[in-house]
Amino acid sequence: MTRARWAVATMAVAALGVGGLANVVDDRYLASGWHTTVHGVEGEDVVGGTFQVHVHGATAAQALADDEPVPSAGWYVVVDLSYATTDEWSTPEEVVLVDRDGREFTHPGGFGSTGAPWLAGPDIWFRGTLLFEVPEDALESLSLVVRGERPRPILPGTVARVPLTVTTTTEPLVVERGSLLPRRER
Amino acid sequence: MSDRVDAYGLEDGEQWVGVVVELTSQGDEPIYLTFNDETFRLPDGVVASDLASAQEAIRLDTGTNLGEVQPGLRYQVALLWRTAVLADPPPELTLSMTRTIYREWSIEAGYYTWRATEDAYEVALPLVEPPEIILEDEEDL
């Protein structure tokens, strides 16, 4: 084979390669929301997109405190955290727990705004608790994922993910509304 | 059957007719019953609403609205429909259950809707007393 033929063959292979790569990008990102995950740890600040998040800890119990304890179909998990934004006042669109199998858990509903995300401002931190309900086999492998903006099929986005150490208790859990923190406190 | 259920929306002459079901989400994400959900149906003519889907879903453990069904949890739920024709309720009622699947929209990736399949089941349910937890307290009436 002459050098010219080699060149043509190489270009053909390269074109196939680029085409294949484009398909992979399509399949992995565009269809499912192309987003970046910033990994954080408990007890430290992490910035994911337009939210700064600081997770203090997480507790699980089989009941919520009320006039009469409210039972769970599994376990309630309360995540104690603080957050602020990086630019304007906003409430995160979606905050979920994710387990090792990729199962996602949201606010259980039926409790009004109790334990649901709250509004925060630019470098203006609020601390409160978020409420979730999960099956027992998820308790050991939960991470908190904060999506300031819900990942969309076309728009890129950034989310923060913090693995949780969940402490279990026999006492019914108390849910705290978000409240303003003094400057530099978490 | 009851007009004492702790839920809003009854008009004059109407009662709630309810079915107790056990629900589990076996997928990876929370799911919820929607106003046009095609899974559960009562016989034609029973429901006093333009919508054939259940109008309320109340958890029997907490007495609260079902909200999102979290993966892997098993819920006992009362599905409720408004009815005006069951003043003298029959001893049993047939519930139809259609298998629905979560289909991605053909016109936009990443968006899904529950759609009925051809698989359907019917079950005859006996008339029983409503679970106490979904009823209003006597003194509140």
Image (tube, coloured by chain):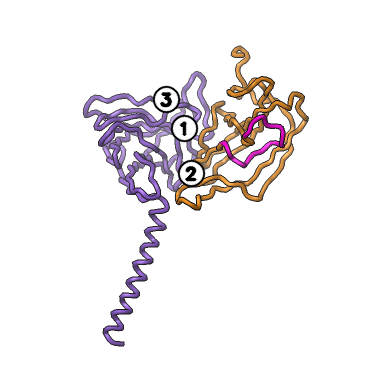
Report which quarter residue A171 is drawn in: top left
- For the stretch drawn in magenta, what is the main secondary structure? loop
**A98 or B98, which lies in front?**
B98
Q: Quadrant of the C terminus of chain A?
A: top left
Q: Which chain is purple?
A: A
**Relative vertical location of residue A12 with respect to residue B41 in this rendering, above or below:** below
Disc 3 secondary structure class: loop
Determine crowd level at label 2: few under 14, some 14-19, many 20+ residues with C-alpha closer than 10 A: some
Q: Assign the N terminus of chain A to one quadrant of the image.
A: bottom left
Q: Is B129 placed above or below A165 here?
A: above
Residue at image position (36%, 40%) is: A149
Q: Residue at x 74, y 24 (%)?
A: B87
Residue B15 versus residue A37: which sits nearer the camera?
B15
Q: Is residue A136 magenta?
A: no
Whole-percent x, y for residue A159 in the image: 34, 43
In this picture, is B82 found above or below B109?
above
Kind of element beneath mark 2: loop
* Tag shown at residue A174: 3
Q: Chain of mark 2?
A: B
Which color was chain B given?
A: orange
The segment highlighted magenta reads B35-50
